[in-house]
Image (cartoon, rainbow, N blue to C red):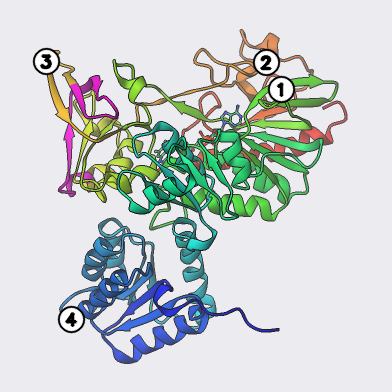
C-alpha cells in the first residue's frame, strides 16, 4: 500500500514553536514533527522576534498558522508578549504557553490577555501523554474553524443579506466547514458568480462535488451539506427534544447507558451555549472554552456512544399514545418513544423599536453570531445588554472591531454581570460602557448604519453610527407547542417534580406515585435545563439536569405501570 502524498510545502499550515534554550526548542520541534510533520510545517525559533518573523513569512506565503507554542521565560520578549503580537497577524492560531511550575500565574494571567488555549508545564515527557493529546485536541478545534480548502463548501453572497447570514450561520453552528466570499469585496466571489450565472439569486452555494445551489432553503442547504435530518428507527427508548448542553448531556448518558436514543435539534447542537464566545466558569476548563468547542466535543461524544442526532428538525408536537409518546416533526415525520426529555432552553427576547425587524440579519443580530466577528474588522459595533452574555460578546468582538460600545439600560453593570468580565472590559481599550441607554430606533437602507439611543433617565435622544449591533436582552421559553397536559408556570417554563404537588397544580398529576424529580405532569416526559421552571440558567446546571433526567428515565422504564 502506498502512503498518501504529503501536501505541498508552501500550502501546508504551520506550527510555530519558540524557546530561547536551543535544546528545548529542538526537542519541541522534534516531538511536533514526529507526529504532525506529514500535515503541518513545523517551524522552530529561538527568540520571540524570530518566531514573529516566521509567523509573518508564513502568512505572506498564504499558509495558515494552526498553532503557536511559546516558552514564557524568554529574554527580550516573553512568551505572552510574543503571543500578543502574533495573534494580530494570525488570529486563527491556537495558543499554548510553555511554562515552568513557577510561571503558572503568568499563564493564568495570559488566559484573558491573549485568549490562551492551554498552558503546558515543562517537561512534557512522555509526549504521548503530556503533549499530543493536548495538541491533537487543539488542532481538531482549529480544523473545525479552518479546514482544508478542497473539502469546503463555498458560499457567495452579500454581506448585508439576511439569507447569506443565515446560510453561514447554519453551517458554522453545525460545524460544517465553508468558505465565505463576499461579492462586493472578493474578486473570486464575483468570478464564481459570473461563472455560475451572472443573474443567479444569492447566496450561491457551491458544493465540493460541483453542484450549485441558488438561494437554497434551510432544509435544502442542510441536506446538501450532509447534516443528518432523518431518523434511522421508528421507535426509540428515549427521544430528547433540544440539543443544548442539557439535551447533549442527556444524549451522552442515555446512549452510553444502553438506551436507544435520538436527539432532535431545531437549529444546531450547542443551543445558547453554542453562541458563547468563551465559557469561563465551566468546571475543568481553566482557560475556558468556546461554546462551539463545547458543542463539537459533546456531539462527537454522544455519537460515539451511538446516539442519533437529527438537526435542522423542529419538534412541533408530543402526543401520548398508550404507554408510548409520539414526537412529531415540522416536516411531518414522527418518532415513537418510551420516554421523552424536553430540553428546549430559551430564546432571545426581541428588541422592540422601529427599524429593528427590517434590519435583522443586515447588521442587527440576536446572540453572539460568531460568523460576524471577522466581518466587523475595523468597524464600530454595539452590544445591547448588561448580563454576562453581553459582556462575553463585547470582549469577543473587541478582538475584531475597531470599537465596541456596551449599551445597558440600567446604571450599574455590576448588578447583572460577573466581576471577572467587568474587569476584562475595564482593561480593554476599545470597549466603552454606556449606561442608562436603550435603542429607540434603528436606521439604514440596505443595512444598519445608525441607531437612536434614548437616555432612560430623562428620555433625551442622540445618534450613534455603527456597522453592527448584537442584542442580548434576556430570554423566554418557547413552550407553546407543548400539549396542555405538560403544566407550565406563569412565564411558560415547564413545571416538574415536587412543583407538581403544590395545591393549585396538583390536580394535573394523575398517578398515585409521586412524580420523579424532573418529571413533568405528563408521566414519562421529563424536563432538563433552562426551560425548566426555577432552573439556574447555567451550562453546568443544564448538563447536570440532562444527565440526572436520564436516571429518572431508567426508573420510569423499570416501573411496570410507568
Ligand atoms: C451568549 C451566551 C453566553 C453564555 N455564557 C455562559 C457562561 O459563560 N457560563 C454559563 O454557565 N452559562 C452561560 N450561558 C447560559 C447557558 O448557555 C445556558 O444556561 C445553557 O445553554 C442552557 O442549556 P439548555 O440545554 O437548557 O438550553 P439551550 O442552550 O437554550 O438549548 C436549547 C436547544 O433546544 C433547541 N430547540 C428549541 N425548541 C426546539 C424544538 N421545538 N425542536 C427542536 N429543538 C428545539 C434550540 O434550538 C436549542 O439548541 C450563556 C448564554 C448565552 C446566550
Q: Which residue is tagged 3?
A: 460
Q: Secondary structure at mark 1?
A: strand
Q: Which residue is tagged 1?
A: 318
What's the CA distance linking mark 1 and mark 3? 49 Å
Residue at x 30%, y 66% (from the top left corner):
107
Q: Residues within 10 Å of mark 3 (few under 14, many from 20)?
A: few
In this view, the residue farthest toward the right is 560
Name the front one of labels 4 and 1: 1
> How many numbered callouts?
4
Q: Of 1 and 421, which appears nearest the observer? A: 1
What's the CA distance linking mark 4 and mark 1? 65 Å
Report the span colored magenta.
425-452
Inspect this view and state whether residue 64 appears.
Answer: yes
Residue at x 53%, y 17% (from the top left corner):
492
Q: Secondary structure at mark 4?
A: loop
Q: Secondary structure at mark 3?
A: loop
Residue at x 67%, y 52% (from the top left corner):
303
Q: Is residue 305 left or right of residue 357?
A: right
Q: Residue 500, located in which quarter of the rendered image?
A: top right
Q: Earlier in the sequence, mark 2 or mark 4?
A: 4
Query: Could you tell me residue 401's position as x and y percent?
Result: 23, 46
Q: Is residue 383 left or right of residue 430?
A: right
Q: Residue 523, located in which quarter of the rendered image?
A: top right
Asked whether mark 3 lies closer than 8 Å to ligand 1, one says no
Q: Which residue is tagged 2?
A: 483
What's the CA distance linking mark 3 and mark 2? 46 Å
Q: Are marks 1 and 2 in contact (CB under 8 Å)?
A: yes
Q: Is residue 34 magenta?
A: no
Q: Are marks 1 and 3 in contact (CB under 8 Å)?
A: no
What's the CA distance linking mark 3 and mark 4? 54 Å
Q: Is residue 442 left or right of residue 92?
A: left
Amino acid at each position: 500500500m502506498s502512503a498518501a502524498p504529503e501536501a505541498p510545502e508552501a500550502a501546508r499550515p504551520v506550527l510555530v514553536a519558540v524557546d530561547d534554550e536551543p535544546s528545548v526548542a529542538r526537542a519541541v520541534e522534534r516531538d511536533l514533527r514526529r507526529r504532525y510533520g506529514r500535515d503541518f510545517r513545523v517551524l522552530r525559533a529561538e527568540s520571540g522576534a524570530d518566531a514573529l518573523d516566521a509567523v509573518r513569512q508564513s502568512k505572506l506565503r498564504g499558509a495558515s498558522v494552526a498553532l503557536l507554542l511559546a516558552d514564557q521565560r524568554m529574554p527580550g520578549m516573553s512568551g505572552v508578549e510574543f503571543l500578543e503580537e502574533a495573534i494580530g497577524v494570525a488570529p486563527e492560531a491556537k495558543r499554548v504557553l510553555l511554562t515552568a511550575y513557577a510561571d503558572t500565574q503568568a499563564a493564568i494571567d495570559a488566559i484573558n490577555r491573549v485568549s490562551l488555549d492551554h498552558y503546558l508545564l515543562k517537561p512534557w515527557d512522555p509526549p504521548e501523554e503530556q503533549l499530543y493529546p493536548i495538541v491533537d485536541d487543539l488542532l481538531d478545534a482549529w480544523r473545525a474553524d479552518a479546514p482544508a480548502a478542497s473539502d469546503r463548501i463555498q458560499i457567495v453572497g452579500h454581506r448585508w443579506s439576511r439569507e447569506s447570514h443565515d446560510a453561514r450561520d447554519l453551517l458554522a453552528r453545525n460545524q460544517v466547514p465553508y468558505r465565505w466570499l463576499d461579492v462586493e469585496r472578493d474578486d473570486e466571489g464575483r468570478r464564481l458568480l459570473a461563472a455560475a450565472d451572472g443573474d443567479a439569486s444569492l447566496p450561491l452555494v457551491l458544493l465540493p462535488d460541483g453542484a450549485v445551489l441558488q438561494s437554497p432553503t434551510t432544509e435544502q442547504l442542510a441536506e446538501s451539506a450532509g447534516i443528518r435530518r432523518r431518523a434511522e428507527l421508528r421507535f426509540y427508548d428515549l427521544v430528547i427534544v433540544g440539543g443544548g448542553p442539557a439535551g447533549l448531556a442527556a444524549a451522552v448518558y442515555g446512549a452510553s447507558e444502553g438506551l436507544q436514543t435520538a436527539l432532535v435539534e431545531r437549529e444546531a447542537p450547542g443551543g445558547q451555549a453554542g453562541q458563547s464566545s468563551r465559557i469561563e466558569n465551566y468546571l475543568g476548563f481553566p482557560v475556558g472554552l468556546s461554546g462551539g468547542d463545547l458543542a463539537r466535543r459533546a456531539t462527537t461524544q454522544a455519537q460515539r456512544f451511538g446516539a442519533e442526532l437529527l438537526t435542522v428538525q423542529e419538534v412541533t408536537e408530543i402526543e401520548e399514545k398508550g404507554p408510548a409518546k409520539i414526537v412529531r416533526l415540522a416536516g411531518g415525520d414522527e418518532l415513537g418513544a418510551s420516554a421523552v426529555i424536553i430540553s428546549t432552553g430559551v430564546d432571545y427576547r426581541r428588541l422592540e423599536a422601529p427599524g429593528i425587524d427590517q434590519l435583522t440579519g443586515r447588521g442587527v443580530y440576536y446572540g453572539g453570531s460568531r460568523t460576524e466577528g471577522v466581518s466587523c474588522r475595523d468597524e464600530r459595533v454595539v452590544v445591547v445588554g448588561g448580563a454576562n452574555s453581553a459582556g462575553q460578546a463585547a470582549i469577543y468582538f473587541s478582538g475584531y472591531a475597531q470599537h465596541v460600545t456596551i449599551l445597558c439600560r440600567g446604571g450599574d453593570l455590576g448588578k447583572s454581570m460577573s466581576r471577572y468580565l467587568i474587569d476584562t472590559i475595564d482593561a480593554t481599550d476599545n470597549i466603552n460602557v454606556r449606561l442608562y441607554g436603550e435603542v429607540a430606533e434603528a436606521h439604514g437602507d440596505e443595512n444598519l448604519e445608525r441607531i437612536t439611543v434614548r437616555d432612560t433617565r430623562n428620555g433625551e435622544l442622540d445618534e450613534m453610527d455603527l456597522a453592527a449591533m448584537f442584542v442580548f436582552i434576556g430570554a423566554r421559553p418557547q413552550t407553546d407547542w407543548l400539549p396542555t397536559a405538560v403544566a407550565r408556570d406563569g412565564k411558560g417554563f415547564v413545571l416538574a417534580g415536587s412543583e407538581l404537588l403544590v395545591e393549585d397544580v396538583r390536580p394535573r398529576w394523575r398517578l398515585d406515585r409521586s412524580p420523579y424529580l424532573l418529571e413533568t405532569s405528563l408521566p414519562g416526559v421529563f424536563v432538563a435545563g433552562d426551560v425548566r421552571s426555577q432552573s439556574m440558567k447555567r451550562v453546568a446546571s443544564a448538563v447536570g439536569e440532562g444527565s440526572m433526567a436520564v436516571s429518572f428515565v431508567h426508573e420510569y422504564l423499570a416501573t411496570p405501570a410507568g
